[in-house]
Amino acid sequence: QVQLVESGGGLVQAGGSLRLSCAVSGSTFSINDMGWYRQAPGNQREWVATITTGGITNYADSVKGRFAISRDNAKNTVYLQMNSLKPEDTAVYYCNRRPSVRLGVRSWSWGQGTQVTVSS
């Protein structure tokens, strides 16, 4: 069974930075496209960023230019560097593999997430 353990969240002032980590166990990490997602109170979970197995990245417009996703296949870990944080970035952040209807790839069970709170 795949386990996702997110860490690195915290309380930060607007304009600050955080680096999130997500350790993946129980699966072949390197063959999966990975993504970061977030869920703010009262909102649905939304996609934030993706990194493919080949290292190609893609971002939601709301974080483009401020966030950077990366991965270390040797450590089975995906990262999210968050800079120039805004209060609207406040949410619980999760990682998971990117699902694909075309390839028949489903998301894994979600981890506990890591809370990011940005004060104004």
Image: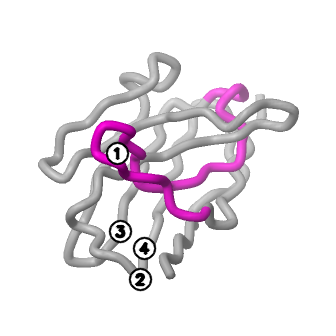
The amino acid type of the residue labelled 3 equals: Thr
Is mark 3 in CB contact (under 8 Å) with mark 2?
Answer: no
Q: Which residue is mark 2?
A: 26
The amino acid type of the residue labelled 2 equals: Gly
Is mark 1 in CB contact (under 8 Å) with mark 2?
Answer: no
Q: Which residue is mark 1?
A: 69
The amino acid type of the residue labelled 4 equals: Val
Q: Earlier in the sequence, mark 4 or mark 1?
A: 4
| Closer to the eye: label 4 or 1 | 4
What segment is highlighted magenta in the picture? 86-109
Name the residue rendered at 61%, 33% in the picture. 46
**Which labelled disc corresponds to residue 77?**
3
**Residue 86 appears at what percent x and percent y?**
64, 27
Is mark 4 in CB contact (under 8 Å) with mark 1?
Answer: no
Q: Which residue is mark 4?
A: 24
Q: Please indicate whether residue 29 sits to the left or right of residue 90 in the image.
A: left
Q: Please indicate whether residue 105 sits to the left or right of residue 56 in the image.
A: right
Classify mark 3: helix, strand or loop: strand
Q: Real-space Cα distance between discs 1 and 2?
A: 21 Å
Is mark 3 in CB contact (under 8 Å) with mark 4?
Answer: yes
Is mark 4 in CB contact (under 8 Å) with mark 2?
Answer: yes
**Residue 57 appears at what percent x and percent y?**
26, 36
